[in-house]
Image (cartoon, rainbow, N blue to C red):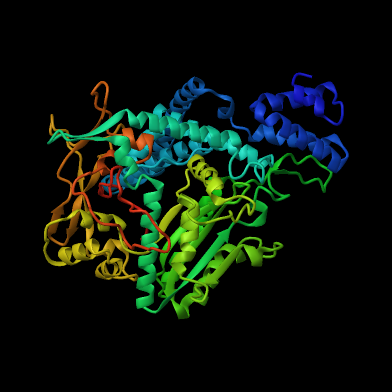
Amino acid sequence: MGYPDMKALQIKPDSMTALHIEKTLGMVPKFFHSPIIKAYNDKIEEYHREREANLFMLGVQEYVPEVLMLDKEEIKRLAKRLSLQNKKNMEQAFCEATLFLFTAYKPFLELGCFPFLLDGIQKKIKEYAYIIGVNFALSHHLSAPKGSTKQGREKRLSCKIWWCNQLEASKKREFEELSRVLGILGRDQMYVTNLGHAFQKQKEENTRENLASKEIVCEETGEKLDLLEFLDGSLANPANKFSELYGVAKGFEAYAKKNDHKGVMLTITLPGFQHANSEKFGFEFEDQSGEENGAKKIQTRVREGQAQLSNGWNRCTTAFKYIGVYPYGQRVVESHLDGTVHWHVGIFLPKDKISEVTDIVKNEFLSKVTPDEKGAKKHRVTAVEEDHKKGAFSSYMFKYLSKTLEAYGVGADDEAPDEDAKNTMPRAKSWASIHGIRRVQMVGGASIGVWRELRRCKDKLSGVLEDARICANSNDWVGYFELQGGHEEPQRKHKIQRLSSEKVDKDTGEIKTNRYGEKIKYTKGIKSGDLRVITRTKTWVIKDKATGETESDDFLSTTIGIDLLEVNPENTIDYPFFYDDPDLNLPNPFLRIGGQSCDPWTINSNSRE
């Protein structure tokens, strides 16, 4: 036999079966050989024949993507081939749609309706070509492209750089997904595989080493700051981010108390058959008819599960509006030991609406999908109402926020009671990084980005901006929230908004664009009606300490996911952020090395209308 692990087979396969097994093992990294052989033996033991075991092998072959066995250079070559193929597909679709639509509408065009129909026909043609391109990307387990313009999204679909980045991310995700299918994740390897976690740790170490060799320089004044030291003192530091988010939770709690609202913690998870530890998860086979039906894949990938929960929650928020409820709070995304996603949504709302809201959520996530599944009514959706006898609601949120970001004072991990959350938190972080999951988002509430810009303002402002500045500089989140319109006012109608601007090339005076032709925008200040306040007056660039070479504008965004244009060390702040809670002993979220405070420089933490 060609592979050492095949010696562990319970039966001696014939030559054709042996080739079938060898083909499967040759399609996956050696890491999976032993689990696949074990699964093959389990099928034989369960069904007492080879057919189901061979079908399992066929299912693995159909599931495993090409990218899983490729190195970086091979991924680059594959990206180039697929980008060219997709460009050809979109061009062909464009031509086919053009021929079909102009032929179909020819009688109307001959009657002189050309000006009225041409724009609509061209729009339909472009939409069809774009859909063909997106479907090609989806067929390779990639996500639809994101961009600020439709033209930019179309260009990504035929760009080899976009394909290369997506395929590299897909390789890591598919490695973890195959581990979920084969039952590798669990008590021994929680959330992610040991290899996946080690890869993420090494990546973080390499990133910090790279950042340590850079400095951030002000173009106007020549002021220099150590980049890594600056980032450690900013919200890029998870400890600081945690402090801020907990402060928001405390602010929401104070607002709810003032308005006689009550908190409810909703825990939402996927149906049991979509969990990787389910007997129905992975490759199952229907053999009732005695005919070969092939592998039936019922696996839900992590990102698919996240999208399923997100879409369901969006439908819930739409239903909330029909009954006049506008909840506000925070949403935390976590993983089960087997890598399956679930949500904790801590929200505040009027006391008399809690029952209606929980019914809407249960109807969406329970009644619509396998409602009779064993344990579904107990575990699919749970709602725990605020109980002051047991403690503050913000303390309940503290547990989930802390476990997600820094594991301060959490103790044992809920998913693994024998493990301290301090030890499991890095693995949960690796899980989120690999699958591209945003772990914490706001539900309703006011813009924390505007709040941060207000805290940069040192001088007295005018009108409502001055009232908001006073609230921000006195840590009065309740006053700021009320000033913006309260919980019933959607963000787009808030009195104070962020002021955006395009980045301009100082040499040519032209507006800068990215490689996809999209204008590069950044937050410049705040606005309210005709009032404008500029909070970012300086331009900062990142340079190499040794050579002095200037890094590209997307250096930080591609390295740690933060845009360079959001970095603004101006107007430092010399007071703690939000609430100083002595019981929790939280750190100053803006304490830089050496004791100096620094300004917030990230913008969004929100997911609101």
Give me the residue at 34% from left, 32% from top. 211
Q: Position of residue 139 (x, y in %)?
A: 54, 37
Q: Position of residue 501 (x, y in %)?
A: 19, 46
Give me the residue at 38% from left, 76% from top. 257
- The answer to whether residue 569 is above or below residue 212 is below
Q: Position of residue 54 (x, y in %)?
A: 78, 33
Q: Quadrant of the C terminus?
A: bottom left
Do we see residue 92 in this rendering?
no
Q: Position of residue 437 (x, y in %)?
A: 48, 47
In which quarter of the view is residue 254 placed?
A: bottom left
- The answer to whether residue 39 is above or below residue 599 is above
In which quarter of the view is residue 364 placed?
A: bottom right
- The answer to whether residue 190 is above or below residue 217 is below
Do we see residue 293 in this rendering?
yes
Horizontal side, residue 600 vs residue 529: left or right: right
Q: Quadrant of the N terminus?
A: top right
Give me the residue at 58% from left, 41% from top. 192
